């Protein structure tokens, strides 16, 4: 039933029965076809940094998952996760770009542009299924591990938001953690940790080799984070939580003072009660050169087409 509804909804937009609205500038959508995380946010950060280096002025649009409000609003490094979501705060801090959130991505895009007239390209974080906002470039992120599509069933029987055939319709597939013919390879790297209470206190992850640590992760795939810490030689005590879990002090009562290591996304929800033993491991996406060339070629083509039509 869910698969039929997805098909009917997509067909309605394709046939014009439901209308998409364009933001007036190029729109790049980064998403996936499964529920949960697959590395979308690091990819959005990579795209924003890459485009800025190439002379573009990007803005970032996000739904703000778990936010208490739905109206369009800016997310900044001073925002609270309860108000704008956790990922938008990371995006604002790491990208240096305007980041706006809200349930209606069409309205969010309009509000962002009104507040930042210099923006000339929008990057949409997790918007592959938000068809009401027209897009120029669709990028799907896929977990390259064998379990990347779970049991292969659509929601609610499985993790798929859309059938796997949807990947044939996107402009590019980015494969995380594995190489695949026809897909761009992405890996996440991070070796420098910092104390949550004092970001200037930084240490290489290797300095924790042999140390027993409590690894906390409320992301789509906590196991991936735990494995990365183990690769540095840490003695990992795993504490997995649901994606976007709203952390509370009681979640960290482990009965000892061993270091607590968490993801950057989780850390923004712990700033108000962090202790000296709270550590953060940020990660950065690394992509092949061909992906950047693809983006520039597509954007240059869109800009040329727009100039021909006086836009």
Image: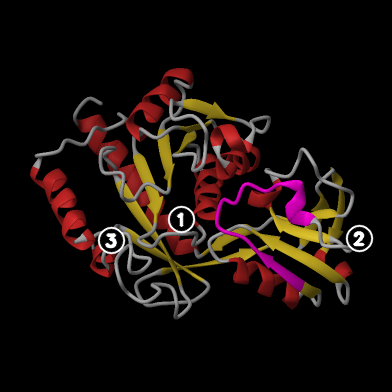
The residue lying toward the viewer, choosing from 183 and 2, is 2
For residue 292, the mark is 1
| Marks 3, 2: nearer the viewer | 2
Label located before the other in sequence (1 or 3): 3
The image shows residue 223 at horizontal and vertical percentages of 61, 71
Distance of label 1 from label 2 (alpha carbons): 44 Å
Where are the magenta residues, as a range? 237-252
Please indicate whether residue 46 sits to the left or right of residue 27 in the image.
right
Instruction: Say which residue label 2 marks.
Output: 257
Nearest to the eye among marks 1 and 3: give it.
3
Residue 162 is labelled as 3
Mark 3 Cα-neighbour bin, 10 Å: few <14, some 14–19, many ≥20: many
Residue at left 54%, top 30%?
98
Q: Are marks 1 and 3 in contact (CB under 8 Å)?
A: no
Of the numbered discs 1 and 2, the one sitting upstream in the chain is 2
Q: Quadrant of the N terminus?
A: bottom left
Q: Splitting the image into 4 quarters, where does residue 216 fall?
A: bottom right
Query: Visible in this render: residue 302?
Result: yes
């Amino acid at each position: 039933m869910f698969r039929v509804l997805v098909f009917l909804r997509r067909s309605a937009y394709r046939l014009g029965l439901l209308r998409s609205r364009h933001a007036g500038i190029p729109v790049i959508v980064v998403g996936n076809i499964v529920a949960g995380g697959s590395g979308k946010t690091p990819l959005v950060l990579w795209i924003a940094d890459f485009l800025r280096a190439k002379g573009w002025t990007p803005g970032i649009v996000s739904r703000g998952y778990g936010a208490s409000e739905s109206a369009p609003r800016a997310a900044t490094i001073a925002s609270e996760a309860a108000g704008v979501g956790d990922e938008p705060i990371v995006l604002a801090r790491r990208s240096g770009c305007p980041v706006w959130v809200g349930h209606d991505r069409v309205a969010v895009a309009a509000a962002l542009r009104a507040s930042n007239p210099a923006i000339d390209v929008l990057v949409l974080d997790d918007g592959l299924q938000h068809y009401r906002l027209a897009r120029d470039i669709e990028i799907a992120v896929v977990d390259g591990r064998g379990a990347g599509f779970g049991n292969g069933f659509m929601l609610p029987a499985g993790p798929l938001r859309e059938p796997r055939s949807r990947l044939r319709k996107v402009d590019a597939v980015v494969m995380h953690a594995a190489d695949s013919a026809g897909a761009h390879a992405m890996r996440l790297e991070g070796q420098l940790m910092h104390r949550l209470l004092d970001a200037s206190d930084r240490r290489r992850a290797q300095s924790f080799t042999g140390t027993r640590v409590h690894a906390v992760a409320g992301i789509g795939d906590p196991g991936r984070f735990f494995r990365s810490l183990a690769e540095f030689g840490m003695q990992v005590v795993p504490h997995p939580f649901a994606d976007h879990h709203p952390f509370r002090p009681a979640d960290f009562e482990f009965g000892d003072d061993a270091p607590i290591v968490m993801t950057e996304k989780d850390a923004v929800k712990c700033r108000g009660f962090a202790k000296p033993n709270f550590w953060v491991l940020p990660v950065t996406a690394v992509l092949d050169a061909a992906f950047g060339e693809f983006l520039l070629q597509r954007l240059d083509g869109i800009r040329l087409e727009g100039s021909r039509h006086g836009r």
